[in-house]
């Protein structure tokens, strides 16, 4: 007997936009269900730079986008300061960069009303001692760093607190159409393979790069372009501020601090499909070779992880993918005769709230609800489970170390057993089965320099002890977890990280022979 | 006669000064004592029969300890001391000591020569000491902080001695040249005054005794043999030829023209009084100048070394003498095993030669200003009581006993110690109200020391710790972790991780860092060659600075 | 002594005594399995040998010694009899250490090591089947199974025959020891035993997250053993055999295990887990004692660089923290390991051998080093990179000739051997080390007085 869930709005996609939309609609008193085929931020929202743009990057190519970034950035700093680190940002040019670009920069910023201040080299090196000493120009702008995981978790948590439902690992199989548009959405739980349905008044696809696929289920064609971007995570934080390359947007241009690490990127590679992507050796080398021109340390420091995401771009048939509009695409499919279906895609993390607001306005218009948007004014409450995504989070929870009896599972990211338990309980509450992957998503386990060498086995032992995992499930979990983490590791294995992965292979293949168990 | 009276008077005054000084030393003990023992009792508490007379004698006569510490310095010092001793007994006090040789005269050969030799030895010693000061030895300039006051006082003493010797030589030279003295002698001791035969004697003396006659010697009619006969009859008993005065004589010959000119105003007399004044100044100020170590060192050397089995409860008189016996030579700090702590924390009170002076000064004044007290406590707590400083101290001071007593004293004064503060501090207090930056207190600076040794800078250099793969071998091998199994909070690998997370300050407050024995087992076994133990040590030094800041804040009033 | 460490004065004294220069017949660079075996082999044959390296790499070994567990990489079954596939391996990888040395030499090497370790108080067990050379199979802390040619005696009782044991197994975990779950092991092995029962015991004074080495040291204390026994006794009757995490003491683990087994009246065996591995630590201590006993000199915590060959001997610089000393040797065995041991260094574009700058056989670009899947069946190509040698285990230059007459390479640094997948690490180390040393001895005229 297949179950049907009734609601007002079904949101498809649990990224920044989807969760932001859930919050917005819930604050307006609307009943919301959000389904996500994987888990929160599985798409671009979980694979971006973590950069809250000042907008200065777009002053040449798209002044409106620049101004939008600026105003949205200021709003976000007000409503969710806990997700943001006010790092400020620098734009740096090195010998060989386009002098005209450099010269026009401050004026372009002024036109876009983005504060921009020239720094002399001494002042610049004081802010960021890692800068290349031969830099020829440095400007300071109000960039900031934002934690997209914390953001999504907190948006969703508040929405749930207001009555919204979040269903993870549930993929839309298809729509049952009727005369007004979509009558029913058929969903499959990718883990239990159960199928169920959701009937809503409005269906919103906030599925990012998968928007084309979702729309196709309703018979709508959205031409999409997939541009993969890869990013590298360094072993420790290299600079306090964000550091941008002062030139026309290219590869390896931005170094963003993310808590105790730095993230350097990015690239732009056309791919056919947003699934099964991973950073390549070529991209890694490209990023490092470009990045080290402005920050020489990038050529020598240890890298921990690489990851990639796909920029969902609605095609414009020409131009390099970066310039295919990075403004968002809010598509009311009423124009195509399906009146209860909306797609919101593309855009930037920085403007997610605005995207959600516009979408919610459209939804409310269709529902004849006249509640105004409150997301720009109401602060986003902090959620405890959102905490474990921050590096070194466990340290803040008590002096020296958490409770002595709380064993440390992941040493290098300091994830204790209590965190694992809390996350497992949370996953269970939402009909999931706690496994290493879901715990990995919601915590930093295995994301540190250890590459999950020992913490994965420890976490597994713990989960067996608490009864969360049984039989031989654990071994399968472990191989899946390690294969998953591997995606972000194997393109940057040299030096220390290679020594680390050798150790990992020594343990898991050499001793445990897990490759014999892998399907 | 006048000379004798003056000398005796000055000696008596000096003696009074000496007694005063000794009493003040004994009273220093009051600061260290729990109760107010009477002075007399304290003096007699030193248990005369258990003193180390052998050490005192050998050290005083032969400066045996200085010989062990540094041969060149010993040479310069011995030259100076022996020369000076000789001069004191055989020259300055020759009115009394000369009686032992019935043929003693200051002007005859052996004594002239020996006086010059002694003077030359003292000169050589002074020159060596001055040269060392001017050049600034490795110790003085680079490593140690020596206050201006020390340098001035020490240099002053040497300059006075130098002046004394130089005026002595110059006086002797002038005496040799002096026509006026020749005339006086002729008046008093020969019957040739006014006689025409005097000219022969004069000529003889001009030739052989380097006297500079203003009118010169007539070229003709001189019978030198006559002169020699006169010389033998009248002068030789008291004056042999000055050639044996191998410093003064050449000086006289070279300076003859000047000598002649200055004879007008009897520079020889003036210089004589200057020389005398300098000597008497030295004597008078002996109890209060650097020269007091002449007495203090023998006293300090009498003290039997403190051993772990025989921990003395109190600071005896001899220990207090030890405080004053310090000559600021700096040997102790050269060998100090916790010198690297100073390089990181930049707290000069880590160094023995600074500690002893602070202790003495503060004890003398009796008032302890919180900042100095905290720094002293911090530095003294760093001390491992390894005893290398006491072993090498040329003055024979039992430094370990001093540091132990100082520790107890600071306990009694209620001065908080760094370890207790670090272990008891709450998280927010240690981290400074949630901020990651320590507050700096003047005098306890943070940052690399000027002479950053191989220890400094590891905790802020990513290359030093980023290669850690968290294999945990270090923690597994750590004897502190094994011993404090339940109490220990972090293993060394977790400290490395805290560094990677940027939490140096948190790491510096951990039990592990404060209990680390620096056994280096972790560093030996690390497969990534990370300098684990060195990093822990640097963190502890950093923690010491932080604890000192907190202690100072507490002493100054109120918890933060 | 609870904490294992070298006998006092052993490593440091030899470093100090010869600060003006060290002379020896053979210098072995690397103190892992290959380095230690080479050092012992040389010393036993009368050579003046110096072993320079960090012995800590042995602590990463599970303690189990492998000949060949899987072939080819990717097959899902363990080998029963390594010898059976040797010909095939030799055809596929003619330059593999096993192809160069041959089965007899491999067996000889294992025998040599087994005897040596037994004399040092660390007995090993081989499969007890008669004529055929067989692998044993033991359980791991993950709940999986693993082959081994020789296993420490303390693990032997848990060996499986045809992948199973028809007994009731009591799996014991110790509260506070992270990463070993009795439930996990019991459930993982449930199909291989008649029945598995998990049990967690609590030992006095053992806190959460106890480092394994410290726990192992505590288990040498009779009072702690008593506490363990008293908890086992109430459950032992239900079981035929008992498995424990491999932390039963550091010195004399066989003695401790035998004592415990006698008191519970059941066979006991240790189950290996990840590093720090106590059986690996025991191996390290045993090797250090072996070297001490044979007169070989061990210099630990040292970097070897700048080798120079003057036609007759090698001169190398050995760097301690801030001092350095010259070592002069007639022959050198390079047993520096792979990426973890720093024997091979992977830069972003290529792999180099940092001491002698030898040619390293390797894939043509970093994009070929690793597969997209961590557990890829055929293994990662980079693991087959390494130094290629001739039949005497001398590294070859680009023309295929030995770079130096008396420079040898042994151990995991050798090419064509993905030891983690093939389960061939120890065997490669042992046979290459023994062969290299034997070749050196023979080349120099054999025996003493070189």
Image (tube, grey):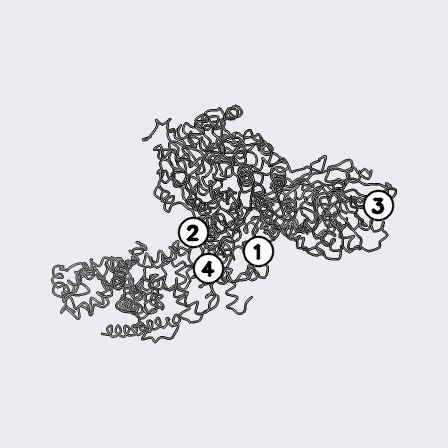
- Asked if residue B393 lies left or right of residue A25, the reply is left
Q: Residue at x 59, y 59 (%)?
A: B435
Q: Which residue is mark 1?
A: A402
- In the rendered image, residue C144, in percent from the top left (x then y), is placed at 56, 39
Question: Which quadrant of the structure image shows residue C431?
Answer: top left
Q: Could you say which is closer to the camera, residue B344 or residue A182?
A: A182
Q: CA distance from mark 1 to mark 2?
A: 32 Å
Q: CA distance from mark 2 to mark 3?
A: 76 Å
Q: Is residue B67 above or below residue C106?
A: below
- Asked if residue B47 lies left or right of residue A199, the reply is left
Instruction: Decide: few, some or many residues near mark 2? Use Cα within 10 Å; few <14, some 14-19, many ≥20.
Output: few
Q: Quadrant of the C terminus of chain B?
A: bottom right
**Which mark, by number, is residue C222?**
2
Disc 4 is placed on an element classified as: loop
Q: For the residues carrying marks 1 and 4, which lies nearer the camera in this image?
A: 1
Q: Is residue B468 visible?
A: no
Q: Is residue A121 above or below residue B408?
A: above
Disc 3 is placed on an element classified as: loop
Q: Chain of mark 4?
A: B
- Tell if the residue under mark 2 belongs to the same chain as the one under mark 3: no
Q: Which residue is mark 4?
A: B347
- Tell if the residue under mark 4 belongs to the same chain as the one under mark 2: no
- In the rendered image, residue C247, in percent from the top left (x then y), is placed at 48, 46
Work out whether mark 1 precedes mark 3 in sequence or the reverse, and give the earlier one. 3
């Amino acid at each position: 007997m297949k179950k049907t869930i009734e609601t007002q709005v079904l949101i498809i996609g649990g990224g920044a936009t989807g969760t932001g939309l859930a919050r917005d609609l819930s604050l307006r008193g609307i009943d919301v269900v959000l389904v996500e085929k994987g888990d929160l931020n599985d798409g671009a929202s979980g694979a971006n730079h973590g950069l809250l743009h000042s907008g200065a990057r777009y002053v040449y190519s798209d002044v409106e986008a620049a101004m939008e970034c600026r105003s949205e950035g200021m709003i976000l700093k007000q409503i969710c300061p806990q997700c943001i680190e006010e790092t400020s940002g620098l734009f740096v040019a090195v010998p060989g960069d386009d002098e005209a670009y450099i010269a026009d920069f401050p004026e372009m910023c002024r036109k876009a009303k983005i504060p921009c201040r020239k720094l002399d080299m001494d002042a610049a090196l004081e802010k960021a001692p890692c800068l290349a000493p031969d830099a020829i120009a440095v400007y300071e702008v109000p960039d900031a760093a934002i934690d997209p995981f914390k953001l999504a978790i907190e948006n969703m948590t508040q929405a749930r607190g207001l009555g919204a439902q979040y269903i993870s690992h549930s993929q839309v199989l298809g729509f049952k159409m009727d005369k007004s548009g979509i009558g029913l959405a058929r969903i499959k739980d990718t883990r239990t393979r159960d199928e169920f349905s959701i009937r809503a008044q409005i269906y919103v696809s906030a599925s990012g790069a998968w928007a084309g696929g979702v729309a196709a289920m309703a018979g709508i064609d959205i031409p999409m372009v997939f541009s993969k971007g890869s990013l590298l995570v360094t072993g420790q934080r290299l600079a306090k501020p964000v550091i941008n390359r002062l030139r026309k947007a290219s590869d390896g241009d931005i170094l963003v601090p993310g808590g105790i690490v730095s993230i350097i990127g990015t690239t732009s590679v056309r791919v056919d499909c947003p699934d099964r992507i991973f950073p390549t050796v070529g991209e890694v080398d490209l990023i490092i070779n470009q990045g080290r021109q402005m920050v020489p340390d990038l050529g020598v420091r240890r890298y921990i992880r690489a990851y990639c995401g796909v920029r969902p771009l609605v095609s414009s048939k020409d131009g390099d993918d970066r310039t295919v509009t990075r403004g968002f695409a809010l598509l009311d499919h009423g124009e195509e005769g399906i009146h209860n279906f909306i797609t919101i895609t593309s855009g930037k993390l920085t403007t997610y709230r605005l995207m959600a607001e516009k979408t919610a306005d459209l939804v409310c218009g269709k529902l004849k609800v006249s509640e105004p948007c409150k997301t720009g004014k109401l602060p986003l409450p902090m959620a405890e489970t959102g905490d474990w995504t921050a590096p070194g989070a466990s340290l803040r929870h008590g002096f020296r170390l958490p409770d002595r009896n709380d064993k440390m599972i992941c040493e290098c990211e300091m994830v204790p057993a209590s965190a694992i338990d809390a996350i497992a309980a949370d996953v269970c509450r939402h009909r999931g089965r706690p496994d290493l992957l879901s715990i990995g998503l919601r915590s930093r386990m295995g994301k540190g320099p250890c590459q999950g060498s020992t913490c994965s086995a420890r976490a597994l032992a713990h989960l067996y002890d608490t009864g969360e995992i049984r039989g031989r499930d654990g071994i399968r979990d472990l191989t899946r977890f390690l294969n998953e983490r591997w995606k972000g590791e194997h393109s940057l294995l040299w030096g220390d990280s290679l020594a680390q992965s050798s150790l990992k292979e020594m343990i898991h293949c050499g001793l445990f022979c897990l490759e014999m168990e892998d399907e | 006669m006048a000379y004798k009276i003056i000398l005796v008077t000055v000696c008596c005054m000096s003696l009074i000064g000496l007694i005063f000084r000794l009493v003040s030393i004994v009273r220093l003990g009051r600061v260290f004592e729990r109760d107010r023992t009477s002075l007399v009792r304290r003096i007699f508490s030193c248990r005369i029969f258990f003193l180390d007379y052998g050490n005192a004698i050998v050290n005083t006569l032969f400066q045996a300890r200085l010989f062990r510490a540094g041969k060149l310095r010993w040479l310069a010092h011995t030259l100076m001391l022996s020369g000076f001793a000789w001069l004191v007994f055989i020259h300055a006090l020759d009115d009394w000591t000369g009686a032992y040789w019935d043929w003693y005269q200051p002007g005859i050969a052996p004594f002239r020569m020996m006086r010059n030799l002694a003077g030359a030895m003292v000169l050589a010693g002074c020159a060596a000491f001055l040269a060392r000061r001017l050049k600034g030895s490795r110790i003085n300039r680079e490593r140690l902080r020596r206050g201006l006051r020390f340098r001035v006082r020490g240099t002053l003493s040497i300059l006075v001695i130098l002046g004394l010797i130089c005026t002595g030589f110059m006086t002797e030279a002038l005496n040799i040249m002096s026509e006026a003295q020749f005339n006086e002698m002729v008046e008093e001791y020969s019957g040739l005054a006014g006689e025409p035969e005097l000219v022969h004697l004069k000529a003889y003396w001009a030739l052989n005794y380097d006297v500079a006659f203003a009118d010169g010697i007539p070229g003709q009619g001189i019978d030198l043999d006559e002169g020699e006969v006169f010389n033998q009859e009248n002068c030789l008993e008291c004056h042999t030829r000055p050639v044996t005065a191998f410093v003064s004589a050449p000086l006289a010959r070279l300076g003859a023209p000047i000598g002649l000119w200055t004879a007008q105003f009897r520079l020889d007399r003036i210089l004589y009084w200057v020389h005398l004044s300098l000597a008497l100044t030295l004597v008078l100020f002996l109890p209060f100048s650097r020269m007091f170590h002449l007495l203090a060192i023998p006293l300090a050397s009498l003290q039997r070394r403190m051993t772990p089995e025989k921990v003395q409860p109190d600071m005896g008189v001899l220990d207090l003498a030890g405080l004053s016996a310090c000559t600021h030579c700096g040997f102790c700090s050269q060998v100090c095993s916790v010198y690297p702590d100073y390089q990181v924390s930049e707290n000069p009170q880590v160094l023995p030669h600074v500690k002893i002076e602070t202790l003495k000064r503060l004890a003398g004044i009796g008032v302890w200003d919180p900042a100095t007290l905290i720094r002293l406590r911090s530095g003294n707590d760093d001390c491992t009581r390894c005893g290398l400083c006491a072993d090498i101290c040329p003055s024979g001071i039992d430094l370990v006993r001093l540091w132990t007593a100082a520790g107890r004293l600071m306990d009694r004064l209620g001065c908080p110690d760094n370890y207790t503060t670090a272990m008891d501090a709450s998280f927010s207090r240690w981290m400074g109200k949630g901020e990651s930056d320590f507050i700096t207190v003047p005098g306890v600076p943070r940052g690399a020391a000027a002479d950053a040794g191989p220890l400094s800078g590891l905790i802020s250099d990513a290359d030093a710790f980023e290669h850690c793969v968290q294999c945990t071998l270090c923690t597994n091998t750590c004897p502190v972790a094994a011993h404090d199994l339940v109490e220990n909070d972090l293993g060394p690998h977790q400290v490395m991780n805290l560094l990677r997370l940027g939490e140096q300050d948190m790491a510096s407050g951990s039990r592990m860092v404060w209990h680390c024995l620096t056994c280096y087992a972790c560093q030996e076994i690390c497969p990534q060659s990370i300098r684990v133990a060195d990093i822990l040590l640097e963190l502890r030094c950093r923690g010491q600075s932080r604890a000192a800041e907190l202690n100072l804040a507490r002493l100054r009033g109120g918890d933060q | 002594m609870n904490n294992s460490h070298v006998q006092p004065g052993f490593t440091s004294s030899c470093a100090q005594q010869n600060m003006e220069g060290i002379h020896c017949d053979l210098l072995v660079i690397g103190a892992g399995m290959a380095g230690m075996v080479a050092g012992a082999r040389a010393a036993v044959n009368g050579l003046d040998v110096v072993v320079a390296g960090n012995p800590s790499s042995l602590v990463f070994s599970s303690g189990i010694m492998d000949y060949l567990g899987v072939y080819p990489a990717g097959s899902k079954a363990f080998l029963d009899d390594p010898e059976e596939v040797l010909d095939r391996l030799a055809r596929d990888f003619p330059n593999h250490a096993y192809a160069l040395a041959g089965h007899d030499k491999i067996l000889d090497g294992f025998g040599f090591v087994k005897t040596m370790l037994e004399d040092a108080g660390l007995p090993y067990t081989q499969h007890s089947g008669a004529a055929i050379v067989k692998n044993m199979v033991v359980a791991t802390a993950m709940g999986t199974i693993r082959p081994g040619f020789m296993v420490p005696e303390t693990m032997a009782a848990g060996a499986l025959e045809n992948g199973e044991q028809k007994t009731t197994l009591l799996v014991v975990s110790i509260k506070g020891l992270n990463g070993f779950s009795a439930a996990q092991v019991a459930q993982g092995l449930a199909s291989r035993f008649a029945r598995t029962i998990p049990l967690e015991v609590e030992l006095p004074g053992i806190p959460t997250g106890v480092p394994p080495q410290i726990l192992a040291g505590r288990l040498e204390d009779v009072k702690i053993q008593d506490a363990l026994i008293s908890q086992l006794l109430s459950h032992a009757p239900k079981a035929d055999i008992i498995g424990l995490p491999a932390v039963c003491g550091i010195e004399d683990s066989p003695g401790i295990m035998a004592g415990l087994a006698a008191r519970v009246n059941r066979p006991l065996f240790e189950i290996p887990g990840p590093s720090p591995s106590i059986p690996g630590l025991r191996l390290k201590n045993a090797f250090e004692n072996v070297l001490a006993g044979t007169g070989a000199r061990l210099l630990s915590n040292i970097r070897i660089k700048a080798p120079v060959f003057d036609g007759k001997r090698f001169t190398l610089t050995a760097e301690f923290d801030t001092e350095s000393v010259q070592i002069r040797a007639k022959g050198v065995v390079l047993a520096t390991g792979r990426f973890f041991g720093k024997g091979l260094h992977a830069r972003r574009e290529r792999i180099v051998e940092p001491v002698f700058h030898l040619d390293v056989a390797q894939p043509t670009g970093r994009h070929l080093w690793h597969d997209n899947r961590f557990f890829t069946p055929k293994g990662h190509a980079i693991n087959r990179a390494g130094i290629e040698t001739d039949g005497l285990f001398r590294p070859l230059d680009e023309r295929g000739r030995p770079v130096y007459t008396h420079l040898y390479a042994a151990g995991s640094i050798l090419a064509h051997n993905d030891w983690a997948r093939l389960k061939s690490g120890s065997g490669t180390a042992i046979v290459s080390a023994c062969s290299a040393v034997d070749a050196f001895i023979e080349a120099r005229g054999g025996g003493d007085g070189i």
